[in-house]
């Protein structure tokens, strides 16, 4: 697939191309994804594929950004801002852990790491379209908890960064270093409860 162009063309089959590309990228990774396979999965010709995305990196970034945005919006939509802070944190932790341990979450992480040296913009695009969206919402809900007298936080940005790290306890290292790909509801619940309890012990008013 020709590289170098940064132009993306919108058109009637744009979403169709992205759907096929998502299927192939998630199955074969960035490097292993063949243009013929992407075109076949999308139900378009290679010429049509090239006309939309002249660079495979652009196609992958668009797939990753759209999926991350969808996951982030889903997580945000699950939050009930008028609920008690521990309940809100429980919901946030649940959504975060489900994403981190999902097939997509695991694949996109591995691809970002594998391509980090020659494709650094991929990691940045992934962060801005997913984790940073959730982080911004996390700051908002923590500010709400402070205003309601439920939280006492001096450095709200740090606290917003700490909570996702608590949600990675046990599961993330096992996933990255031991290659474990699935976790039981009990294992996830254990981490969720620990993350919320630890966070509230530190920042609960």
Image: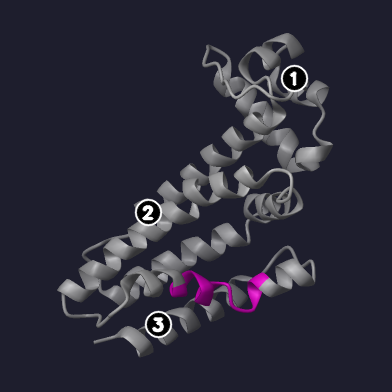
Gap in Å between the C-alphas at discs 3 and 2? 19 Å
In percent of width and height, residue 69 lies at: 47, 43
Gap in Å between the C-alphas at discs 2 and 1? 33 Å
* Residue that badge 1 annotates: 39
**Could you say which quadrant of the image residue 42 lies in?**
top right
* Mark closest to the chain's N terminus, 3 or 2: 2
**Against 204, is 132 above or below?**
above
User: Which secondary structure lies at badge 3?
Assistant: helix
User: Which secondary structure lies at badge 2?
Assistant: helix
Q: Quadrant of the C terminus?
A: bottom left
**Could you say which quadrant of the image residue 175 lies in?**
bottom right
Magenta stretch bounds: 162-172
* Residue that badge 2 annotates: 76
Q: Quadrant of the N terminus?
A: top right
Q: Is residue 202 magenta?
A: no
Q: Is residue 132 left or right of residue 88?
A: right
In percent of width and height, residue 13 lies at: 58, 15
Q: Which mark is residue 199?
A: 3
In percent of width and height, residue 181 lies at: 73, 63
Q: Residue at x 35, y 51 (%)?
A: 77
């Amino acid at each position: 697939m020709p590289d170098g162009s940064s132009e993306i063309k919108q058109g009637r089959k744009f979403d169709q191309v992205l759907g096929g590309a998502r299927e192939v990228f998630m199955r074969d990774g960035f490097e292993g994804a063949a243009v013929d396979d992407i075109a076949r999965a999308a139900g378009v010709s290679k010429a049509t594929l090239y006309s939309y995305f002249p660079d495979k990196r652009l196609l992958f970034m668009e797939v990753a950004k759209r999926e991350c945005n969808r996951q982030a919006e889903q997580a945000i939509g699950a939050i009930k801002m008028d609920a008690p802070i521990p309940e809100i944190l429980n919901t946030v932790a649940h959504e975060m852990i489900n994403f981190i341990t999902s097939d997509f979450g695991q694949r996109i992480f591995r691809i970002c790491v594998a391509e980090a040296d020659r494709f650094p913009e991929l990691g940045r695009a992934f962060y801005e379209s997913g984790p940073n969206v959730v982080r911004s919402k996390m700051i908002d809900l923590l500010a709400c908890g402070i205003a309601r007298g439920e939280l006492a936080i001096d450095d709200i940005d740090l606290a917003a960064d700490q909570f996702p790290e608590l949600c990675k306890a046990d599961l993330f290292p096992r996933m990255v270093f031991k290659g474990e790909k699935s976790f039981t509801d009990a294992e996830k619940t254990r981490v969720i409860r620990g993350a919320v309890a630890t966070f509230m012990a530190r920042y609960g008013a």
